Image (cartoon, rainbow, N blue to C red):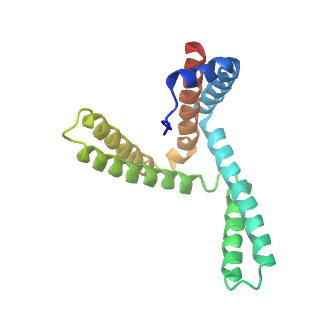
Amino acid sequence: MTDPTPNTEDIMDVVREYRSQFRNVGIALIVLGVLAVLFPLIFSIAAKVFLGWVFLLTGGVMLYHAFHVRSWQSALWSGLIAVLHLALGVYLGFFALTGLVGLTFLLGLVFIVQGVFEGLIAVQHRPQTGWGWLALNGAVTLILGFLLIAGLPGTALWAIGLLLGLNFLMSGIAFMALARLA
């Protein structure tokens, strides 16, 4: 039986073959990341509007499905879920500043839950080397969650865009590093 984990040499062969693509994606992500960090409100709104359009599309598909399977005993419930998706899509997609507070609150809650779970993971690994890093990660994530929620509504104006920007920036740096190593 072969090992399902790819060999490091195989990965670097692929990176070497597509080095310019890795570099170009890295550059694009770095540029988008810097822009998002500099203009977090614009990127927060853009992310929220994009999410709204995703809900509009899923709601439309689900409503179409519900009408076509009317004989299914759960078609009414499926249709109601579709209407819920459509309503949320309209709310997020067409009203620029509405919904940012709710999304930021949800992001804060996710960070709090994630921080608790990461703390539990750290406790599980406590006798092993490196458990302190796991605990630190959990504590920082937990604190970030509380800070996001405590700072509402002000944090809603920058938090999502800034976090997206930092994510894009780090991903871009990783792609550029891979391209340079190849």
Q: Position of residue 54 (x, y in %)?
A: 71, 55
Near-viewer residue (135 or 12) = 12
Res 84 quadrant in image: bottom right
Locate residue 98 relative to residue 123 in the image: left or right.
right
Locate residue 142 relative to residue 20 in the image: left or right.
left
Near-viewer residue (182 or 116) = 182
Q: Quadrant of the C terminus?
A: top right
Name the residue located 33 percent from the left edge and 43 percent from the top edge.
138
Res 180 quadrant in image: top right
Locate residue 68 relative to residue 101 in the image: left or right.
right
In the rendered view, tell whether residue 120 sits above or below residue 180.
Answer: below
In the rendered view, tell whether residue 78 sits above or below residue 12.
Answer: below
Q: Position of residue 134 (x, y in %)?
A: 31, 39
In the rendered view, tell whether residue 119 sits above or below residue 74.
Answer: above
Name the residue located 40 percent from the left edge and 50 percent from the top edge.
114
Locate residue 103 relative to residue 61 in the image: left or right.
left
Near-viewer residue (64 or 107) = 64
Q: Position of residue 124 (x, y in %)?
A: 25, 47
Q: Position of residue 9 (x, y in %)?
A: 53, 20
